[in-house]
Image (spheres, grey):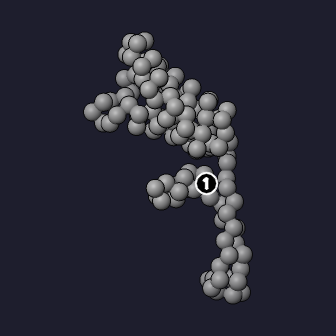
């Protein structure tokens, strides 16, 4: 990959990668870091992109997604989700029991992206 090719790819796809990273992280600075790391990964190892498998934008968004998931794992981020069961539960004799469930952020992402 030449410098001209890289500049062209960067100009064309930087906004899409940034928007995706911003939506996933909820942070402008986090999105900037992920976007930078994503394009650095392409610059360091351009052979990882295979045009036969899909477009460059899909590859870059996939790299960004993996970087975000890696960041979440290292930060040990968990999201607390409270559910109220209205029917009797097999875990509790009471009719209404409040339970706390802990979800990984990527579980929430999977659930929200399934609605798209």
Q: Residues within 10 Å of mark 1 (few under 14, many from 20)?
A: some
Where does residue 42 sit, x and y in percent of width and height? Answer: 45, 24
Q: Is residue 45 visible?
A: no
**Residue drawn at the location 67% of the way across and 48% of the way down:** 77
Q: In the image shown, does 93 or 114 lie closer to the viewer?
A: 114
Where does residue 36 sit, x and y in percent of width and height? Answer: 57, 26
Q: Is residue 69 visible?
A: yes
Where does residue 111 sit, x and y in percent of width and height? Answer: 52, 59
Q: Secondary structure at mark 1?
A: loop
**Residue drawn at the location 68% of the way across and 42% of the way down:** 75
24 in relation to 113, above or below: above
Q: State left or right for residue 112 relative to residue 102.
A: left
**Residue drawn at the location 65% of the way across and 79% of the way down:** 85
91 in relation to 65, above or below: below
**Residue indicated by mark 1:** 104
Q: State left or right for residue 88 relative to residue 35.
A: right
Question: Which quadrant is home to the N terminus?
Answer: top left
**Residue drawn at the location 37% of the way across and 28% of the way down:** 49
Where does residue 52 sit, x and y in percent of width and height? Answer: 27, 33
Q: Residue furthest left?
A: 52
């Amino acid at each position: 990959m030449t410098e001209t090719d890289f500049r062209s790819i960067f100009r064309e796809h930087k906004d899409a990668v940034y928007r995706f990273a911003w939506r996933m992280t909820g942070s402008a600075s986090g999105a900037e870091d992920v976007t930078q790391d994503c394009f650095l990964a392409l610059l360091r190892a351009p052979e990882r992109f295979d045009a036969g498998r899909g477009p460059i934008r899909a590859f870059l968004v996939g790299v960004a997604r993996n970087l975000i998931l890696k960041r979440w794992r290292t930060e040990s981020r968990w999201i607390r989700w409270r559910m109220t069961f209205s029917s009797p539960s097999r875990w509790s004799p009471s009719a209404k029991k409040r339970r706390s469930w802990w979800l990984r952020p990527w579980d929430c992402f999977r659930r929200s992206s399934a609605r798209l």
